[in-house]
Amino acid sequence: MKKLFLTLTFIFGLFTINAQRAQSIYAEILGNGLFYSVNYDVRFANVDNQFGIRLGAAYFVEAAYLIVQPNYLFGEDKHKLELGAGFTTLLEFGNGANENQLAANASIMYRFQNPEGNFLFQAGLAPTFVPIDEDDTFSGLSRLFWIWPGVSFGYKF
C-alpha cells in the first residue's frame, strides 16, 4: 500500500509542476473505476479545448484500480464532448493474492465546465474491454466487454 501511495504521489506531482495548465479534480460514480474513482485531469496547454490526460484511482477491499486515460475536449464555452481512450489496471493484494489485470477503457462524456467558474460536471458512457486468459496459455483467452455509465462532480482550477 505504501508503494501505491508513493507512486500516485509522484505521478500527480509531475502534472502539477506547471501551474499554468488547466486542471481539474473530480469524483466519478461508476464509470472507468467500476464503482467510484477519484480523478485528476490536466490539459497539456492552458486552454480547455485540447489534449489532456486523466489519472484516477479507486480502492476496494484488497484491491485498487488505477486509471490512465488521454483525452480530448471538443466544444466551445461551457458545454464540451470528452473522448478518451486508455487503460485501467486492477491491483489485487492481501491473502497472498498477486493477480493484476489490465483493461482497455474509453470515455464518451458530456462535460459542463463554466470558463468563469470552478464547477465541473460530467455524464456519459465508459466502455471497457478485459481480456482474460483462463489457463495462462493464451489458448483459453476469452473477453469481457461492457459499457458502464458514469457521472462526475468536481472542481476546475
Image (tube, rainbow, N blue to C red):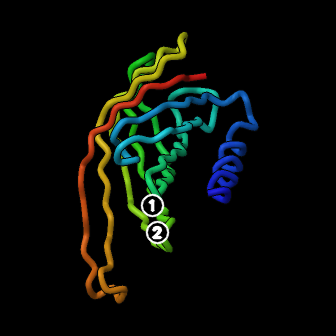
In depth, the one of 140 and 77 nearer the eye is: 140
Farthest residue in the top direction? 116
The number of callouts visible is: 2
Residue 153, image quadrant: top left
- Badge number at residue 100: 2
* Sequence-wise first label, 1 or 2: 1
| Res 16 label | none
Tell me if residue 115 comes above or below residue 154 in the rendering: above
Query: Mark 2: which amino acid?
Result: Asn
**How far apart, in angstroms, are the residues tagged by discs 1 and 2?**
5 Å
Q: Nearer the viewer, residue 29 or 17?
A: 29
Instruction: Answer with the quarter of the image where residue 116 lies.
Output: top right
| Left or right of residue 31: residue 64 | right
Q: Position of residue 76 (x, y in %)?
A: 43, 20
Q: Secondary structure at mark 1?
A: strand
Left/right placement of residue 40 relative to residue 6 reads left
Q: Residue furthest right?
A: 17
* Percent x, y of residue 35: 35, 44
14, above or below 155, in the image: below
**Residue carrying label 1:** 90
Q: Residue at x 48, y 51 (%)?
A: 67
Question: Which residue is drawn at the image coordinates 50% and 74% (left, top)?
Answer: 96
Q: List x then y, in percent, for residue 73.
A: 45, 33
Residue type at mark 1 is Leu
Q: Residue at x 46, y 22 (%)?
A: 120
Q: Are marks 1 and 2 in contact (CB under 8 Å)?
A: yes
Q: Which quadrant: the N terminus?
A: bottom right
